Image (cartoon, rainbow, N blue to C red):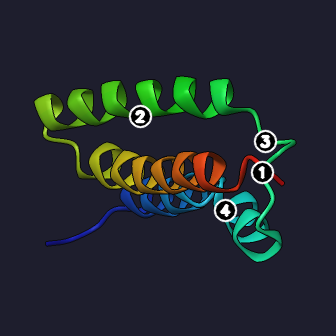
Amino acid sequence: MQLSGVDVLGYVAGLITAFTFLPQVLKTWKTKSAKDVSLAMFLIALTNQILWLAFGILRDDPVIIITNALMLLMTSLMIILKLKYNHS
C-alpha cells in the first residue's frame, strides 16, 4: 500500500487529534481528582466520537476510523476516571 502525502498528513493529524485528551487522562489518573473535569463535555465528546466512528466505517475511511476509535478510548477512560475520582 502506497501512502500519498495527503494520507500521511491525515494520519499524523488524526493521531495528534486522538491524543487530545491524553494529558487530562494522565493528570486525573496521577492526582486521583476529577472535581474540575466537566462530565458533560466528555459525554458530548463521546457522542461525537461514536457518530464520527460510524461515519468513518460507512465511508471505509481508515483515518477517520482510527482517529475516532482512539478518541473514543481516551474519552471513555476520562469518563471512567471522572466517575471514580469525582469525590476529590
Position of residue 16 relative to residue 52, above or below, is: below
Amino acid, disc 3: Val
Residue at 74 percent of width and 58 percent of height = 24
Give the structural element (helix, strand or loop) at label 4. helix
Residue at 76 percent of width and 67 percent of height = 32
Q: Could you tell whether 1 is left or right of 18 in the image?
A: left
Instruction: Give the mark nearer the N terminus: 1 vs 2.
Output: 1
Position of residue 71 relative to residue 38, above or below, is: below
Front-most of 54 and 60?
54
Amino acid, disc 1: Ala
Q: Which residue is mark 3?
A: 37
Q: Which residue is mark 1?
A: 34
Are the residues flagged by discs 4 and 3 in contact, CB closer than 8 Å?
A: no
Q: Could you tell whether 27 is left or right of 18 in the image?
A: right
Distance, label 4 to label 3, CA atoms, is 10 Å
Amino acid, disc 2: Gln
**Residue 30 pos. (x, y %):** 77, 76
Distance, label 4 to label 2, CA atoms, is 17 Å
> For the residue carrying disc 3, how many other residues have a C-alpha within 10 Å: few (<14), some (14-19), or many (20+)?
some
Amino acid, disc 4: Val
Of circles 4 and 1, which is in front?
Answer: 1
Instruction: Give the mark nearer the N terminus: 4 vs 2.
Output: 4
Instruction: Give the mark nearer the N terminus: 4 vs 3.
Output: 4
Are the residues flagged by discs 4 and 2 in contact, CB closer than 8 Å?
A: no
Of circles 1 and 2, which is in front?
Answer: 1
Distance, label 4 to label 1, CA atoms, is 10 Å
> For the residue carrying disc 1, how many other residues have a C-alpha within 10 Å: few (<14), some (14-19), or many (20+)?
many
